[in-house]
Amino acid sequence: MNDCETRREMIQEIRSLDFAIVELGLYLDTHPDDQKALCLHNKYCKELDELKEQYQKVYGPLTINYPCNKWRWLEEPWPWERGNF
């Protein structure tokens, strides 16, 4: 698998986990005692944090909130300049 495919798969997994977390949060608003849903929400939050950390170490910040020593996105081509997305 090439780097571009790996990056796309990681972004897709990040999006999927984000979606699942929001949906479970909405469900938990009306079912706060559902322990299975709460455990799944917590699991997905942990997985998302780990995946974002892994992605950002390799490809750079996803948001401005990611701590770094330099502004990496200013040193690299923008996504539309790479032609990958």
Image: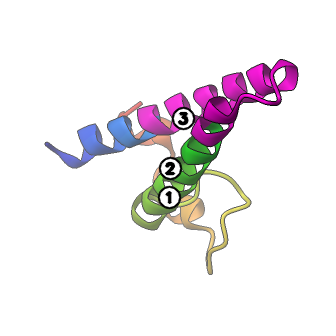
Quadrant housing residue 83 = top left
Q: Which residue is mark 1?
A: 50
42 or 77, which lies in front?
42
Q: How is the image coloured?
A: rainbow
* Residue 9 spot, x, y in % from top left: 34, 36
Q: Which residue is mark 2?
A: 47
Element on which disc 1 rests: helix
Q: Is residue 84 left or right of residue 26?
A: left
In space, the residues marked 3 and 2 are separated at their CA atoms by 8 Å
At 55% from the left edge and 66% from the top edge, which residue is drawn?
72
Q: Magenta stretch containing residue 3, yes or no?
A: no
Q: Which residue is mark 3?
A: 17
At 63% from the left edge and 69% from the top edge, which residue is drawn?
71
Residue 49 drawn above or below residue 10: below
In space, the residues marked 3 and 1 are separated at their CA atoms by 11 Å
In space, the residues marked 2 and 1 are separated at their CA atoms by 5 Å
Residue 53 drawn above or below residue 67: above
* Residue 11 spot, x, y in % from top left: 45, 38
* Residue 6 spot, x, y in % from top left: 28, 44
Element on which disc 3 rests: helix
Do the residues bearing badges 2 and 1 touch, measured as CB atoms within 8 Å?
A: yes
Mark 3 is on which residue type? Leu
Q: Residues within 10 Å of mark 1 (few under 14, many from 20)?
A: few
Q: Which residues are magenta?
A: 12-40
Instruction: State which quarter of the image contains the C terminus.
Output: top left
Do the residues bearing badges 3 and 1 touch, measured as CB atoms within 8 Å?
A: no
